[in-house]
Amino acid sequence: MLFNSIEYTIFLPIVFFLYWFIVNKKLHYQNLFLVAASYLFYGWWDWRFLFLIILSSVVDYSIGILISNSIDKVLRKVYLTISLIINLGLLGYFKYCNFFIESFLDAFSIMGKPVDSQLLNIILPVGISFYTFQTLSYTIDVYNKKIECSKNIIAFFSFVSFFPQLVAGPIERASNLLPQFSRERKFNPVLATDGMRQILWGFFKKIVVADNCAIYANEIFNNSGDYNGSTLIIGAIFFSFQIYCDFSGYSDIAIGTARLLGLELKQNFAFPYFSRDIGEFWRRWHISLSTWFRDYLYIPLGGSKGGTLNKIKNTFIIFIVSGFWHGANWTFVIWGFLNAIYFLPLLLSGSNRKHLDTIAENRYLPNLKEVINVTITFGLITFAWIFFRAEDLNHAISYVSTIFSPSVFSVPYFKDGTLAVGTILSVGFLLIIEWIGRSQKHALEAYDHLPKYLKYLIFFLIAVLILENYNLATSQEFIYFDF
């Protein structure tokens, strides 16, 4: 079920009403209802893949108890290994099986020994990368004795399947979300109101900005051979805002929905396009995934300890694995590799944690140096997004080659200039609203201090823009459903 579908606009109010007014007498009933609602939400896409979520839940719930009850170090490691094999095995089969088959066949072709074979007809279950990492973090944390195992199977199933963040994150840690299913929840109007604001802003980013940017990004990328270099640059910029508003918009809707239900999810985006260097960008972009790789891959590998070569090796591993997590295509690997290259100078100079504050903190506008740094960072990120968006490496190389050709000095052109102007204005509106709210957890949180009439006027304007731009026939799926 899509957040931007008619079905969801019916589903959410019904869930909200039943959750707070019918099953609110006992926590156990609330959790059981959330599991049922979450399975309905996910099964709306394809009910068969509910068995995968149930399997992951049963495996990691059981493994958590076995690890917790065992004092034998070897046996504990065996249990953890079983969890890793089952979870990563399922993820590997559904997401990467065809990739490895295709790469294997290509390798034989390069050696002059082509092999005639067909790829498997494997459907990628929506959200498998997200809930797999979520359950894995639970068993790893239990193994490392960072958290206690859950003995409440309904609470644990609620944690794994919680519908707002089930298919595209944030990737929640058991230490944050799981205990919330064991605590009594009472309706909090302040929390719910803030949740509604965040949902509103999430829909604006998705429907008004991302879906309109997608029109041009898709047209330009899908027909890149028909356009000059300057237009391809514009296409890459459109995609930069498309993927940001699409993914962060989903996170805003997910976090806001959770607040309506009395639960708090972690912030997943912190205005990343206002970053002054690549290190700051990765602290602000897809925070739940970046910190997951940091805690469960980078640090276990040794992190920044040891010599320079070890730091470089670990940096490349985490970025390349992050790229591969996004999809079974060499373009994602190159995207991760490029970001590692970008990050390397900061790592070697020890300045990767230079910008930990908010840009232009306590100031209305950035200074010239900040503007230059943000522009350069955005330019590097946008260049890397070309590989992320391209169909394959040949497409990416062709796209980049045209950008670095004399045609880059030609005037960009669009099939519908009027709509392009409207899309650019919506991006400008987004940047203004987010700049004002850049110190908050979400953009509209910053508008509480305004007079009521002005605050509600802004919210009304945003709602009107959403309604004007919403078109069921042309609404886009969320990009990260593919990952």
Image (spheres, rainbow, N blue to C red):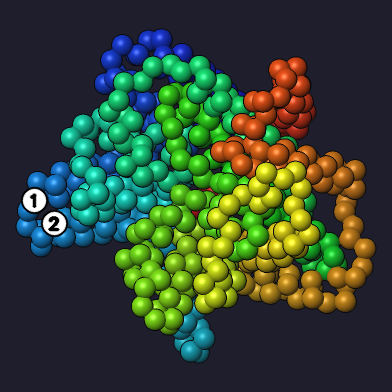
Count of number-bearing discs: 2
Q: Residue at x 72, y 59 (%)?
A: 370
Instruction: Decide: few, some or many residues near mark 2? Use Cα within 10 Å; few <14, some 14-19, many ≥20.
Output: many
Q: Amino acid at mark 1?
A: Ser
> Would you place residue 227 above or below residue 218 in this image?
below
Q: Is residue 121 visible?
A: no
Pointers 2 and 1 in contact (C-beta within 8 Å): yes
Residue 272 at x, y = what percent? 62, 52
* Residue 86 percent location from the top left of the image: 26, 55
Q: Residue at x 90, y 57 (%)?
A: 413
Along the line of sight, which residue is nearer the eye, 219 or 88? 88
Q: Amino acid at mark 2?
A: Arg
x, y percentage for residue 259? 48, 27
Which numbered marker is on residue 76? 2
Image point 44% across, 67% down: which residue?
318
Q: Which residue is mark 1?
A: 70
Q: Nearer the viewer, residue 250 or 482?
A: 250
Q: Residue furthest bottom?
A: 112
Seen in the picture, residue 277 relative to 58 is either above or below; the reply is below
**Which SS class for mark 1?**
loop
